[in-house]
Amino acid sequence: MTPEEFLQGVYQPLPSIIESARHIFHNEPLKEIRNFKSSNFDEVIHNVHAIIQQAQQTNSHHLILISGVPGAGKTFVGLTLAYESPSAVYLSGNAPLVDVLQDALQTTTFVQALRNYKDDFKNDLPLNEHVLIFDEAQRAWDAVKMKGPFSEPDVMIQIAKLKPWSVVIGLIGEGQEIHTGEEQGIRLWNDAIAGQNFTVHAKHNQEAFPNALEYYENAHLHLNTSLRTHNALQYFKWVEAFLEGDIATNRPIEQHLQKERFILKRMTSLGEAKHYVRGVYQDSNKTYGLVTSSKNRAVQQVPFSQPRDRIKPHVAYYNDPSSQYYCRNLQYAATEFHSQGLELDMTIVVWGNDLTWRQNDWQFNQYALNRQAENPIQMKLNAYRVLLTRGRDGVIIVKS
């Protein structure tokens, strides 16, 4: 590529996870994406396939943890591996994500709900997959949340051990724990492989997995480039500083984002924000919508179920332009539970009274904290981290 061609080029972010899943499932080539070509996506896929082949040839059991920078495409990697690997299944405990992808793909086999898969195991139904892909593996439920003697990683490892060979692939994100029972992170996976003869492959420090039969530190299992937007890394730094109340760090980041045309605005009127985003995307098929905390009652929220609806409301929010719930109608807001793992081109974050900034510190309204959580304050911050990181082109924050 010549310098002139580069300067005349247009930045192309990776298609949304819904669009990407459709491309994979229908075996269509993804459009040319410069940022995608600059990532190590293919290298990660190649390394995982090599480990799967090793497991099959040696009748051995392996745990692979794939990590990545924000917006790096961990879910995209998981879907690709599920499609390309014989006897593989993509499992997620994120029910809205599963619902939206199953509706977009019009199949219930390519992506499955983790809960249903666990139930099949408990009911002794045949599970034929050798490759189990677990999305958001750091959010796996502990035994207390499972209301039994086993955690979700325990169950996954037990299922895998039923096979002469197996590979469990965990997709690892950080700071996304928003439910009780999800706060122990990858420690549960080390506990689950105790005495099970599992070889672990990860970028993480070997000290995190003393129970591994063998441990291979592999830098090629970490996605090193953000595909969501070319400014995602800088914006994620802004979100972290914002949630830490670090105003001094945020100022230069905001200036950088402004120069790079990443939209980051604060508005006092929801009507003004709606008018603005409609103007930005006039004559465009890009998606935009409202997101808000589940504890914010000042804005209509997308319900999880409505008996008379053709499809589930949270699915309609992403997939059905004819629905009243569709994101671009700007009538209903998706909560952190609806939106985790999914994204819009631009979000309007309707900020609630459950988290307020007073006297140079965050104030947490007691009614809005989950008292069953080990760290309810951190869980509240995680909820807003999810809300603040759903927009690919930009984010508008409006106080409700």
Image (spheres, helix red, strand yellow):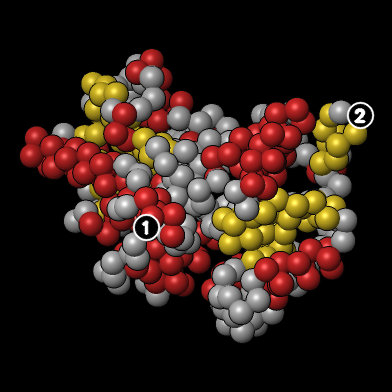
Residue at left offset 40%, top offset 75%: 106
Quadrant in which the C terminus appears: bottom right
Q: Is residue 44 above or below residue 276?
A: above
- State the mark number for residue 20: none
Residue at left offset 51%, top offset 51%: 229
Q: Is residue 115 above or below residue 149?
A: below
**Horizontal and vertical percent position of residue 316:** 59, 74
Q: Which amino acid, by three-letter code, is at mark 2?
A: Gln
- Snapshot quadrant of residue 21: bottom left
**Horizontal and vertical percent position of residue 294:** 74, 53
Mark 2 to mark 1: distance in Å? 51 Å
Mark 1 residue crowding within 10 angstroms, few (<14) / some (14–19) / many (20+): few
Element type where label 2 sits in the image: loop
Residue at left offset 82%, top offset 41%: 355
Res 273 seen here: yes
- Which of discs 2 and 1 lies nearer the camera? The answer is 1
**Horizontal and vertical percent position of residue 117:** 39, 54
- State the mark number for residue 5: 1
